[in-house]
Image: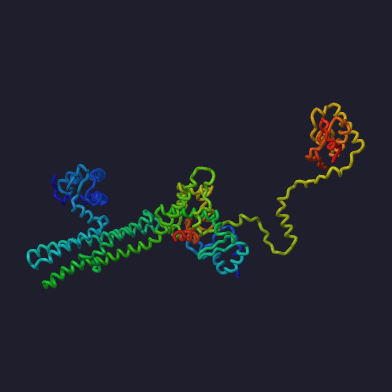
Amino acid sequence: MKLNRDVLVNAILRHQSVFLRILDSIDTGGGANEFPESEYLRLYNQEICRDDDENVHNHLAINTLLENGVFIHNNRSSGTITVERVIIDLLRFIDVKRRRELTSADFESMRSQLYSAVSRLDLTEFGDDDYSENMQTVNQIISEIHSKVRSNVDTLTAQVGTIAERYENLQEHQGDYNVAELYDAISRLYERFVLPCLEFISPKVTMVQTRTFSQTMDDLIHYHSKRYAQNKVAREIGYRRTAITSYYKDIRELAGRLERYALYLDRDRQQFLAVEKAYQALDETLQPLRHGKRRSRLLTPTMPFFAQFQTFAGLRTFRATYSARLNWSAKHTPMLAREYLRSIADKISDEPPVQRLKPVAAAPDPSLLRQQHIASVLDTALQSVDIFSDDITDIYAYVDSFLRTTLDDFSLVDTLYGYHSFLAFIDMSEVTVAYSGGRNRLEDDKYYFDYLIPSISAEVSNDEAHKEVGHV
Amino acid sequence: MFNQALSVELFKELTNGRVINKYKLQNNGEETENELFTEVMSNLDTYRLQYRMSGYELIEHEDYFYIRDADVGFDDLQSDITMKVSVLLILLGKYVNDKGYILSKLTSTAGGLSDADLDEIETLPNTIELMEKCDFKKGFKHAFKSSLVDRNIMLQKPTDGRYVLSAAGRAFFAALTC
């Protein structure tokens, strides 16, 4: 249905939040004044349809907006809707933060338009029809430049305000952005938008083979004042130029604020990048340790990565490596020794001291009664046991083990005497006693006996030199 | 003339592997002069001699000092503690970056890490791995306390219990940025 445009504008303003989001969608979509139809339908259902006034539902329906020129095209194949530019400008006019900053291309477009128009004017005679037509164009371009520069200053002021807000949040440790992102945002705003605006209206900037905005305006003033002595017109043009270039001060101030933020943030950014770099290097150091085995899986101080950190080089707990120290003067007093004994008292074992064994040669000979008893025991044993069924490799050990188990009050002296008694009971013509060269040791609780091992075998050796009986 | 009581306290602090900072935190969280630092600076030659005679080297910086073995070669200076402290500080720096803070979160007395921050750091996957690789058996918070707080590399604000870097801790990040 056809509607008056003021009705539609009222409805749009009533739901400006929806259209501002559409504007955001247009800005992220490349600035072609197009947005997805599906997004509008979603917002229409979620927000516009909740309006109590049902007329608004009809006013803001896609078909109504298309019919009345708010939406100028609905592309079914791509699923996008194109919005009338006036509506876009209106929305940007409402919300200064959503105004688009002028880029270098925008400024260059404005400059070249003005330069072309003034160049064409320069070919005309003051007062004729061509002059009037061209001067009208020049006036329109100057007005448009004035409007855009003013709008751009407002936009940039709002953008710098947003930067300031983020910076304060960062300082107060409420980071929605990290320092590197904010620094990049500042750099981008400064280089892409503030600097081109500053250069556009600065009278000091010069261009090769063409004229800047200020120079073109000077040419226009010169055309009227010098060529045709139209000082009044020239003065009016001069006022309009001043009105535009007066924004230089505002832009310069914005640039100064951004430079200060960038300067403050630069140190934080350096720290940010340094930490990121260190962490990255640490992560690379960890890579070879992620092998899943038990060994060589821990970081060690000798790894090359840690060589760069010298702030705490050599820091460690020294006390852990030392035991308690006596902190007394150097005077020689018995207290020192007593304290030492006291300090080591708990380390001294309560076990009785180890008795040192004596050689068995120092032991007294057994009594005659004892000798007879040993001989009797051995005699009885040899009668009941055939000891020559196998060779005896160690006669001392054989006698010792026999007597040790038989006698109640065994002593190593008994073994010595028993050895001689043992040999006395054997017919030496039938056996051979020989020394192999090996040594052995027998002990009781008082004595020890080191000896060369004598062995006995039933075969008679031809080497009579080795045939020997006796003890060491 | 040196102060006997302070020199004894200094000896205990230094031989326990702690750093002496120029400032400590007073009750309102602001920095105030550390009498131990002032004591050494006032009798610097005496203390240099004391620790040199004991086989140590007094490592003096503008805002902090500590001791280390005098007979250790440059290649052997990297101790286990040095390694662990470095890893923990880098971990804190990374947390600050990832959360969108700036480093003054760690340095400013208006900032500081809260217990909630420490809890969050402890649960991060990279923290768990680094604790294992550094052989910290009792987890991040224990490592933070034993390696940073107990050694005066991080100071706890009496008012709100948050932790900020001491002069020595700040020196680590300053060196990192250079």
Q: In this rendering, does residue A142 appear at all?
A: no
Instruction: Report whether B37 appears left or right of A232.
Output: right
Instruction: Report whether B44 appears left or right of B109.
Output: right
Instruction: Report whether A155 appears left or right of B160.
Output: left
Q: Quadrant of residue A264?
A: bottom left
Q: In this rendering, does residue B87 appear at all?
A: yes
- Residue A105 rendering spot, x and y as whole percentages: 23, 58
- Image quarter (top left, top right, bottom left or bottom right) of the N terminus of chain A: top left
> Residue lying farthest right?
A368
- Residue A106 rendering spot, x and y as whole percentages: 22, 58
Q: Quadrant of residue B5?
A: bottom right
- Residue B118 rendering spot, x and y as whole percentages: 47, 51
**Residue at 52%, 59% in the rendered image:** A312
The residue closer to the viewer here, B85 or A125, is: A125
Instruction: Report whether A77 appears left or right of B12.
Output: left
Q: Quadrant of residue A417?
A: top right
**Residue at 40%, 61% in the rendered image:** A267
Display coloring? rainbow
The residue closer to the viewer here, A369 or B110, is: A369
**Residue at 74%, 62% in the rendered image:** A333
**Residue at 18%, 67% in the rendered image:** A217
- Image quarter (top left, top right, bottom left or bottom right) of the C terminus of chain A: top right
- Residue A268 rendering spot, x and y as whole percentages: 40, 59
Total count of labels: 0
